[in-house]
Amino acid sequence: MANRILLAFECYVILFFHISCLFSMLILLITMAKLIIAIGSIENSNIKMFNLFSPFSYAPWCPACQQIELTWESFAKESEHLDVTVGKVDVTQEPGLSGRFFVTTLPTIYHANNGVFRRYRGSRTLEDLQGYVLERKWEAVEPVAGWKSPSSIMMHGMAGLFHFSGWIRVSNYVVVFSIPLFMLRIIICLEVKT
């Protein structure tokens, strides 16, 4: 009798685990579809250079972002004369983009031209940013590897994963469905491995 109860309990645990995995995969697919549509508009636009994570008020907790704030604003004002589009993205509002560009440090600056992405690692003075564009120094910089390119399938998945993890952080499904925290970690680990 005890074996039957234990077996039934194990079956329910396994069933619950599979249902939660399917639910999370469905949410991930929906999120990725929305993100791919949103990212497509960014990739297809005529962006040549943009600061992926701008200092301004988008990352007030980031000292390095605060240091480059005025420089980046001046560079954005000068961008019309340089025939360059300059933009910024807040990592706290757009976790999918931070995943897509595999950002590990703040602020991160990328140069994008005709779908080819290069990470800018030079000095963050206004003169150096302008020189990077005017003197076409970006041509000497190695493009981001194919599989790490923000337009690759791999980074589409990474963007979805970052977006999904941000969604889990702010959603209340953990409370509503009584999903324990360790189950969420297992689900996310399974999604990363698949």
Image (cartoon, rainbow, N blue to C red):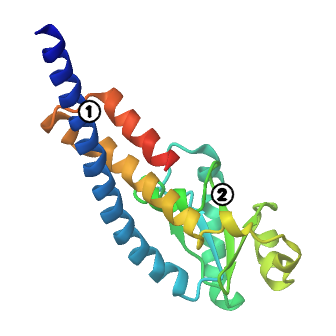
With 99 as the anchor, is 164 left or right in this view? left
Instruction: Work out whether 29 lies above or below 15.
Output: below
Q: Please tell me whether mark 2 sits on a helix, a strand or a loop.
A: helix
Q: Residue furthest left?
A: 1
- Which of the two residues, 188 or 193, is positioned nearer the viewer here? 193
Q: How many marks?
A: 2
The quadrant of the image that shows the N terminus is top left
- Label 1 neighbour load within 10 Å: few <14, some 14-19, many 20+: few
Under mark 1, the amino acid is: Ile
Q: Residue at x 47, y 56 (%)?
A: 58
- The image position of residue 65, as x and y in percent, is 60, 52
With 3 as the anchor, is 193 left or right in this view? right
Q: Which residue is mark 2?
A: 68
Q: Quadrant of residue 186?
A: top left
Q: Which mark is in front, 1 or 2?
A: 1
Q: Residue furthest top?
A: 2
Label disc, if present, on residue 172 of the rendered structure: none
Q: Residue at x 18, y 12 (%)?
A: 3
Q: Which residue is mark 1?
A: 14
Q: Residue at x 34, y 70 (%)?
A: 34
Q: Quadrant of residue 94?
A: bottom left
Q: Please tell me whether mark 1 sits on a helix, a strand or a loop.
A: helix
Under mark 2, the amino acid is: Ile
- Which of the two residues, 3 or 70, is positioned nearer the viewer here? 3
Instruction: Work out whether 35 lies above or below 18.
Output: below
- Label 2 neighbour load within 10 Å: few <14, some 14-19, many 20+: some
